[in-house]
Image (cartoon, grey):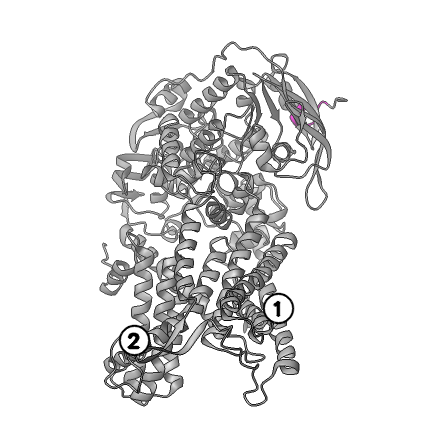
Amino acid sequence: MDTVVEFRHITKRFPGIIANNDISLSIRKGEILAILGENGAGKSTLMSMLFGMQTPDEGEILIRGKKEHISSPLVANDLNIGMVHQHFMLVENQSITENIIMGIEPKKRYLGLFPYVDVQSSNEKVRELSKHYQLEVNPEDIIEDLPVSTRQRVEILKMLYRNAEILIFDEPSAVLTPQEIESLLGIIKNLRESGKTIILITHKLDEIKKIADRCAILCKGKLVGVLDVPSTTTQEMSALMVGRDVSLTLTSTEHTQGAEVLRVEGLTVETNDHIRKVDKVSFSLHSGEVLAIAGVAGNGQVEIADAIAGLLPVKEGSIFLDGQEITTHTVRQRIEAGVAYIPEDRHSVGLVLDFPLRENLCLKQYYQEPYSNSRGVLQQQQMDALATELISAFDIRSGSGAATLARSMSGGNQQKAIIAREINLQANVLMFVQPTRGLDVGAIETIHKKIDELRAQGKAILLISLELDEIMELADTILVLYNGRTQTIKSASTMTKLEVGEYMMGVHVEKA
Amino acid sequence: MLKKPNLIKRIFVYCCGPGKHQLLRVSLFCIFLSLLAGTVLLLLLGKNPLEAYRSILQGAGILPKTRYAGKKSQLTDFMSLLNYTTPMIFAALSVAVALKSGIFNICVSGIMVFSGFLATVLVGYSSLAPMIAKPLVILIGIVAGGLIGVLIGYLRHRFNMNEVVVAIMLNYIISYVVSFFIQTKFVDPITRQSVEVGQNARLTLFDYPIMNLKMEINLVFPLALITVFSIRYFINRTRFGFELKAVGLNSKASNYAGINVGKTMVTTMLISGALAGLAGVSYYLGSNASIQPRVLPSLGFDSIAVALLGNTTAIGCFFASLLVMVFDSGTTYMSSRMQVLREIAALITSILLLFSAIGIFFRALANRYAREAEEV
């Protein structure tokens, strides 16, 4: 097979870190190449150089055998390279077609004088394109009405419309539900059948196993191996990626369930525009128990956690913590009563990004002794001491220690910082919402071990996740939510993954 | 293929680019640019710019003049500068504190009129002893300003009303209501302004004889200095300062962390309003003695640019206020000495304010050039 892209001795440095260290890699025409690596291993940096968002410090990139200086995404476009970003770049209030043709709008003139954008013919072109690649979309739909999976299709169509031959996918499955992932993998396979070259940046080993032909593994900026996927096991891949063996299935420690800690009765939550997100949900959570709430994204899981933390008002029902009703308590009262919360949105909720790491680690305790004295003056040394302690205990890596701005840290380390802060609260109830989203195998393993440890210590844990595997691995009890209602609540050992999946899709409807 | 960035860009990045003391360097760069623009302006008018700048400094009492009128000296000029700077310091601090928690307080002018008017009416025309009247004026300034501040903060938090719109409307309401009362009850028929306040209530002593000189002594200037340091301490070192900054940077995360966002906003505006109130009394019962009806003091709006020039830090606000007022008070002397129109002289101050307001733009531009330079 021909080589379409060749990296030759690529090195890229950022202040204090070598993101890519002497990487040489060639990509063949018509293959699916997976790029695997931990957070901060340099996958995204390597790909952003191919797409022209960064330029290498050393080394060269050859496209179709010709040396190219890819100085901007526009140049990449001309070389038929396209990229689907992890965070979609779409204009919400425009139609699919308008988004796709943006920047290369076909122009026509009224009466040969007044220019206008020819949307009609573009609609047709987009429709043809979507049929040809089996990416069914209606070109006239407005983006904000569409689910995430369709938006992703729009991003893919955007590349195809620009005649991209080399397609880069940056963690495409991170935002999708299991069913949507299946269909995405189908789409990617289809694209390969029609002769496109595909580069897939991902953490998920099973996806690689399913569709990739080869897999390049990066570890700490270095290329540690290029494997032929069909002849390699997932264990081998993950061992190379983290530089050590990872136990993929966690052996739960022995534990006993204790007294009831959190009880939720008939909880109903509505949004500001009176849409019922959570409808009469009841459950109780015991010390030493992991209760997982499973469900397809947007079925009310996050709202349950927000209501328990006090971020959303409770419409009906009550919440009891250690037998005390906390339904109308303020956020701070609940924190002090013992509710720790790792929120879904790290950037806009979990952290103050423009605060240094130290302030973020103290974000829930800054007002208490010893971090503030009785006259309301912050005690910098105490805050420093706490930050230093948590940074080393949780292995939070950052450019300049406690003084690093949270914004400049990698996603995995930001999440570690939040988890460190919440665990340090010594709360009895810990709510984890999507704790491992977008993290690498190594970090996921650490977090799973932490959760297991906390359970062994007798903490009550509410786990909300879209990853079925994660739920099956950790949960003692599973509550399945569908359209804001409880589908079922059962002991995890009595259910198979398939059953949970069916409940999630609303197949079994049981009277609760 | 390698392209070197041109020299001008490199110098610009060196001046304003990322690194140590970037904020300070950008501010200094803004000042430098405005001096440069002023130089061009003066050259176009056929004046010697060096001489002009020197006379500005002389007028403000930084450099000695060649001749002084009787009972005047460089010291009297300098004391007069401090007198005029005092309200600006308070006003700039007011803007800066509000900005730290993400609120854009453009109601400083309105609050100044409101607190100045209340103090004038309640104390200014009374015959209280100076020892009682003066502290009372300060107290009224703080309370009246704080009230308006709380109103803005409450409306913003409770009804999610845009504070800028509220502030613009309040500016109008205050200005017209106050001028109604002045014109119907307290008008001086000759000046068409409010009747001058009594010396007992005034916060500035005019023509106060010291060492055979006639001085202007602003009694609240020491208070302004103390306020600068207390605000700095308050923002950087206290629990409430932490909350204020957290809310300003990310109100969602602050709410999640248990900070009462509404209370923080209202309290911030209470402080910001109180500072603006202090600016009002030190202006209308200090450097001035009467209120001109239907005119909002331009100082209240200039203070926004001054706060930005000072990077919304307390110490920065102090130096920026001083600098702007040096220009403001020095230009009078310059215009008479250099035979430049008063308007042209005032233009130089305006240029400084203009450039200081766009410091953020320079910073962003320099950061972008620095990134580009790294990549090439």
Crowdedness near tag 2: few (<14), some (14–19) or many (≥20) residues, C-alpha within 10 Å: some
Q: State the residue lying farthest toward the front.
A: B129
Report, in whole angstroms, how far the alpha carbon at label 2 lies from the one at label 1.
42 Å
Quarter of the figure with the N terminus of chain B: bottom left
Label 2 belongs to which residue?
B75
Q: Which mark is residue B243?
A: none
Picture coordinates of residue A372 (x, y %)? Answer: 45, 38
Is residue A506 magenta-colored? yes
User: Please, what is the dominant secondary structure of the magenta stretch?
Assistant: loop
Nearest the viewer among A113 and B47 is B47
Q: Secondary structure at mark 2?
A: helix
The answer to which image quadrant residue A63 occupies is top left
Picture coordinates of residue A503 (x, y %)? Answer: 67, 23
**Residue B212 falls left or right of residue B293:** left
Nearest the viewer among B139 and B288 is B139
Q: Is residue A279 visible?
A: no
Label 1 belongs to which residue?
B169
Q: Is residue B143 above or below residue A225?
A: below
Q: Which residues are magenta?
A: A503-508
Residue at 52%, 66% in the rendered image: B132
Q: Secondary structure at mark 1?
A: helix
Is residue B93 magenta-colored? no
Chain of the residue on which disc 2 is drawn: B
Please name which of the two marks, 2 or 1, marks the residue nearer to the observer. Answer: 2
**Residue B314 falls left or right of residue B128:** left
